[in-house]
Image: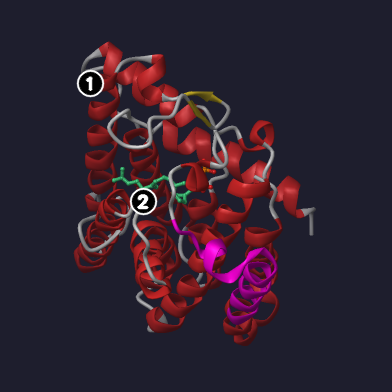
Amino acid sequence: MIKLEKFISNFAREFDEFFINLLPKNKFSKKLHKAMSYTLSVGGKRLRPIFLVEISKIFDVGYISALRAAAAVEFIHCYSLVHDDLPAMDDDDLRRGHNTCHKQFDDATAILVGDALQSLAFEILSDKKTHSDPEVRCRLIKELSSSSGAKGMVGGQMLDLEAENKKLNLKQILFLQKLKTGELFRFSCIAGPILARAKQLDIFTTFADNLGLAFQIKDDLLDIDGDENKMGKKTKKDSSRGKGTLISFYGKENARKKSQELINNSKNILKPFGSKADRLIQLTNYVISRNK
Ligand code: GRG
């Protein structure tokens, strides 16, 4: 088996080529097209896509179907970052080591880039190329829309905006994070079983709940201790905005322990899949061992 880092970078290269090609060709505004291409081409770890594709492999889902569903979730993720970076939200100049979309272009363009990427995600899922069975396509659309909308990522972002300089309790923080970050991981982990018409949605939902929270704890730890150059974005943002985070509740050491427990829970769920899940287990570890 090739080393994990190499595997991740190979995947990202192949995936990027695939998903940038899903952009509608120049039949609309050249500026919008340029800004969408810019947003997709500045990198990112592609964690959600890689989990979606690796889980799909366990269920012998066709590679193109998995890549298309992975592209849909990454389009939503990219749109959320573009909107999150806007002056009306987090007001950031740097993302993935490059100018944020509104810095490179302008605020209105960045809003439209996010909107267009969101629509594109659902256009991709609704296409026959994603799956021949319309029920499967509808299920994917239903799950991604609820994961990304008011009951999911957008709802979590709203709670986050409302939480500035407020003291949330642990239950409230966990709920906010589950919506804002966990829900897109949930979609990424159940899309494979949906594409395969498999029954294991519940266990992959539990897998995702543990994984998503571990990811968030690591994200909070990196916000405190991470290297801005490696991460390609501004750090120490939570503390500067007076936000309560999981670290402010657990403390750094216990937060690390908690994230390891969550990752162990996720890995235990993969045990019945034997060696078919070897790569997935490595990726699951990577969620908390990463330095960006
Ligand atoms: C604006 C609707 C809307 C939602 C924004 C995603 C999000 C919600 C806000 C981004 C701010 C943030 C730090 C969220 C917490 C976790 C997160 C999504 C981190 C970024 O994800 P990574 O680390 O990023 O997978 P890359 O760049 O590698 O894809």
Instruction: Please name the amino acid that badge 2 sits on.
Output: Asn
Tell me residue 24's x, y (percent). Answer: 29, 28
List x then y, in percent, for residue 211: 53, 68
- Tell me the SS state at disc 1: helix
Is 161 on the left-hand or right-hand side of 5?
A: left
In terms of depth relative to the viewer, which is nearer, 159 or 140? Answer: 159
Rendering coords of residue 232 (x, y %): 59, 32
Q: Which residues are magenta?
A: 244-265
User: What mark, if any, has residue 213 been given in the picture?
Assistant: none
Query: Please, which residue is most extreme toward the top here?
Result: 30
Mark 2, residues whose alpha carbon is within 10 Å: few (<14), some, or many (≥20)? few
44 sits to left or right of 190: right
The image's colour scheme reads: secondary structure
Judge whether residue 254 is colored magenta: yes
Mark number, residue 165:
2
Identify the residue at image location x=23%, y=62%.
146
Q: Residue at x 30, y 16 (%)?
A: 106
> In the displayed structure, does residue 101 sit left or right of residue 272?
left
In this view, the residue in front, 258 or 288, is 258
Tell me the tag on residue 108: 1
Please tell me whether mark 1 or mark 2 is closer to you in this view. Answer: 2
Q: Magenta-highlighted stretch: main secondary structure?
A: helix
Q: Secondary structure at mark 2?
A: loop
Distance Cα–Cα, label 1 vs label 2: 28 Å
Q: Amino acid at mark 1?
A: Ala
Q: Residue, x 51% and y 47% (percent of image)?
A: 239
